[in-house]
Image: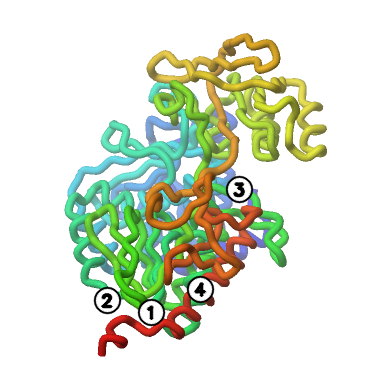
């Protein structure tokens, strides 16, 4: 299952294992167990620090990773290939005693958690959001003896998925009860578990000195802004809810110049590593709620955070990005993650053999329908306009699929459900004026993006679409406040454009700083 190149890389990684570990496999005679046995045999054959032994667990096939002489606290149910292969490698290293990259403060916070905390995470192998959650919880289990974690491939344990009504991944259960759904970083998980974490983080932020440049948002635009600002030798910070932004939700990137192919999470990790290399003060899992302009030219701009703390800066770069646009119809919010989904790569495998809809006839919608057609029983694509808007090559592919129907001039009016999951949708036939209902198990919404700028209304100039209005230098309507990326009026929302705009905003901010003296200097 592993090619020679991967085997050689794994041997180098496994040399870092400090304490020998055992793969404790619970296997049957079914094909999935045979596949897992072959996979684990290959892993164990690469080093004498890993041995394969047989155990007995209620989930078959599955395997635990245990340090010799200790009870296993990390388990994988299903073969962790695809996006989860790295999760397996990190689990082997961390259980085997290789030190994690987290700060001493984070490790101390993990070790202080009381238990027992029994986590179960349902993932899909095509989900690019799941590894962050799986890796965070696996690390916690490897470090803290009061924590256990099982990572479960939902496609391989369909009966569990249906019994627990898991309709979106990653889905995390704690001690048998729902804990979280969707992408979470380690900091966010710890904040949910450690009730004092938010207050401590707010105090630490409140104690920070003012920044020369403070970037809001950790996506491509924000990362480029921070790197370009830090290279000028000025005090630079980033405050973001999640580092990487919407790039984390992007599966394949094939138009990033000089890189023929990469994936969103890989690019996000590279961006974070690059930013860290310049000593930028990165404050993750923090949401900005308000911007207070400087009281006088050259004065300090205030950013108020949801946790109650504030940050001060001489200049600010807003790179808050965008999020999926919703249909805004009755039933949509009630059944989000209960059949209403936005990521076909992540949640598509959970609808194997079922009937689903895709809303939107642009490139994203048609690509989603094509992907889903290979998994589900039937796809119906609904488009508001009289014809699809996707590229011709995508439309041709879509029309060649036998289990796809296309309905144009269709306005979705309501999502229906039985209280626990989606059962269908209603739409208005804009040609006849009739309302029709279609029975479905899932709805994938692909109708564009909305800028994350609601918190800025009334503070600076926004376009009718809610985008931050900027000039050719990225300057907003407020002195000292710049903006870049998908949240702005700059056309063509692309990663490479966002990076360029972020660099431009940082250079503009630096130019502002050297031309506008600080208010205290003027007063002196």
Q: Specify the quadrant that holds the C terminus.
A: bottom left
Separation of marks 1 and 3 at Cα, in angstroms: 34 Å
Q: Which mark is residue 251?
A: 3
Dot 4 falls on a residue whose secondary structure is helix
* For residue 122, side relative to residue 379 (left or right): left
* Secondary structure category for the residue under label 2: loop
Q: Which residue is mark 1?
A: 235
Name which quarter of the figure residue 496 lies in: bottom right
How many C-alpha atoms fall within 10 Å of the one at disc 3: few (<14), some, or many (≥20)?
some
- The percent coordinates of residue 92 (x first, y second) are 44, 56
Nearer the N terminus, badge 2 or badge 1? 2
Is residue 437 rendered to the left or right of residue 179? right
User: Callout 4 environment at 10 Å: few (<14), some (14 to 19), or many (20+)?
Assistant: many
Q: Nearer the viewer, mark 1 or mark 3?
A: 1
Q: Which residue in the protein does label 4 denote?
A: 506
Q: Residue at x 60, y 16 (%)?
A: 428
């Amino acid at each position: 299952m592993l090619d020679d190149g991967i085997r050689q890389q794994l041997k180098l990684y496994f040399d870092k294992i400090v304490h020998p570990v055992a793969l404790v496999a619970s296997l049957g005679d079914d094909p999935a167990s045979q596949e897992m046995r072959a996979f684990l045999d290959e892993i164990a054959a690469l080093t004498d620090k890993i041995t394969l032994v047989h155990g007995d667990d209620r989930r078959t096939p599955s395997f635990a990773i245990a340090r010799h002489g200790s009870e296993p606290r990390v388990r994988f149910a299903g073969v962790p290939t695809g996006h989860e292969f790295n999760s397996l490698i990190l689990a082997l290293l961390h259980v085997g005693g290789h030190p994690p990259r987290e700060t001493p403060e984070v490790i101390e916070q993990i070790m202080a958690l009381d238990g027992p905390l029994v986590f179960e995470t349902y993932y899909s192998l095509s989900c690019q959001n799941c590894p962050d959650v799986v890796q965070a919880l696996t690390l916690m289990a490897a470090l803290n003896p009061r924590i256990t974690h099982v990572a479960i491939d939902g496609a391989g344990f369909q009966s569990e998925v249906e019994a627990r009504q898991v309709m979106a991944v990653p889905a995390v259960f704690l001690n048998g009860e729902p804990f979280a759904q969707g992408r979470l970083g380690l900091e966010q998980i710890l904040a949910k578990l450690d009730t004092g974490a938010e207050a401590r983080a707010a105090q630490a932020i409140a104690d920070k000195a003012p920044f020369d440049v403070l970037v809001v948002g950790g996506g491509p635009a924000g990362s480029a802004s921070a790197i370009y600002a830090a290279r000028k030798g000025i005090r630079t910070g980033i405050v973001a809810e999640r580092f990487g932004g919407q790039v984390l939700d992007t599966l394949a990137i094939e138009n990033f110049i000089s890189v023929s192919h990469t994936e969103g999470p890989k690019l996000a990790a590279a961006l974070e590593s690059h930013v860290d290399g310049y000593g930028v003060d990165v404050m993750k899992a923090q949401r900005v709620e308000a911007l207070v302009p400087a009281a006088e030219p050259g004065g300090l701009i205030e950013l108020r955070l949801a946790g109650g703390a504030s940050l001060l800066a001489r200049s600010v770069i807003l790179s808050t990005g965008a999020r999926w646009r919703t249909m805004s119809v009755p039933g949509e919010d009630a059944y989000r993650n209960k059949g209403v989904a936005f990521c076909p790569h992540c949640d598509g495998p959970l609808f194997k053999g079922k009937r689903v809809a895709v809303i939107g006839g642009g490139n994203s919608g048609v690509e989603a329908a094509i992907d889903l057609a290979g998994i589900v029983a039937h796809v119906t694509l609904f488009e508001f306009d009289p014809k699809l808007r996707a590229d011709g090559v995508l439309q041709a592919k879509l029309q060649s699929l036998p289990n796809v129907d296309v309905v144009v001039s269709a306005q979705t009016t309501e999502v229906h459900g039985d209280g626990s999951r989606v059962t269908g949708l209603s739409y208005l036939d804009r040609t006849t004026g009739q309302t029709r209902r279609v029975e479905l198990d899932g709805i994938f919404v692909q109708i564009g993006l909305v800028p994350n700028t609601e918190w800025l209304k009334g503070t600076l100039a926004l376009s009718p679409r809610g985008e931050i209005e900027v000039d050719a230098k990225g300057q907003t309507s407020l002195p000292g406040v710049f903006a870049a990326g998908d949240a702005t009026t700059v056309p063509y929302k692309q990663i490479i454009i966002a990076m360029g705009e972020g660099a431009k905003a940082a250079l503009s901010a630096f130019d502002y700083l050297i031309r506008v003296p600080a208010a205290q200097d003027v007063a002196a």
